[in-house]
Amino acid sequence: MAETIQYFRTADGVLASRKTTADAEEPQPLPEGATALTEEEYETALAAVEEARQQHAEELIATDRANQLADYTALRTSGIPEATARRLTGYEGPDVEN
């Protein structure tokens, strides 16, 4: 039995691969509207998706940390004790000046 891997992008932009094992000489037809990709094109596109995901995750983490610091600073400035402000915000950085 021959094993075939098809790489493609669906009509809505999703990257996909499909491994088939069959005796047929022709691979299965791609889903309607899909575009065939070479393995290299697929790997390159997948790497770009992973890079974008990583960048987005880093942006979310940075935003979360900035929000924690802002909340922590507001609590400390209003006279809330350090331990309470840390517990409420999850902030783990250095204490701020009151």
Image (cartoon, rainbow, N blue to C red):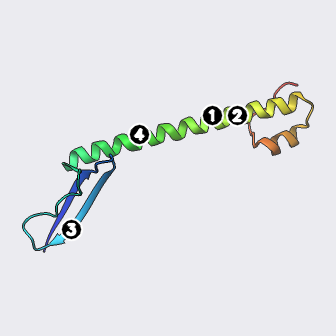
Residue nearer the viewer, 37 or 94: 37
What residue appears at the point 78 percent right and 34 percent down from the top-left corner? 71
Q: How many marks?
A: 4
Q: Is residue 36 above or below residue 77?
A: below
Query: What residue does disc 1 label?
Result: 63
Query: What residue does disc 4 label?
Result: 51
Instruction: Tell me which label, 1 or 3, sits earlier in the chain.
Output: 3
Question: Circle 3: is it few (<14), some (14-19), or many (20+) Cα within 10 Å?
Answer: some
Instruction: Tell me which label, 3 or 4, sits earlier in the chain.
Output: 3
Q: Is residue 39 left or right of residue 26?
A: right
Residue nearer the viewer, 32 or 26: 32
Secondary structure at numbered mark 1: helix
> Where, quadrant-wise, is the N terminus in this rendering?
bottom left
Instruction: Tell me which label, 2 or 4, sits earlier in the chain.
Output: 4
What residue appears at the point 68 percent right and 32 percent down from the top-left corner? 66
Secondary structure at numbered mark 4: helix
Mark 2, mark 4: which one is toward the viewer? 2
| Image spot of residue 33 (x, y percent) | 23, 50
Secondary structure at numbered mark 3: strand
- Disc 2 vs disc 1: Cβ atoms closer than 8 Å? yes
Query: What residue does disc 3 label?
Result: 20
Instruction: Tell me which label, 4 or 1, sits earlier in the chain.
Output: 4
| Image spot of residue 14 (x, y percent) | 34, 49
Q: Distance between the residues labelled 4 and 1?
A: 18 Å
The amino acid type, in three-letter code, at marker 4 is: Glu
Question: Circle 2: is it few (<14), some (14-19), or many (20+) Cα within 10 Å?
Answer: some
Mark 3, mark 4: which one is toward the viewer? 3
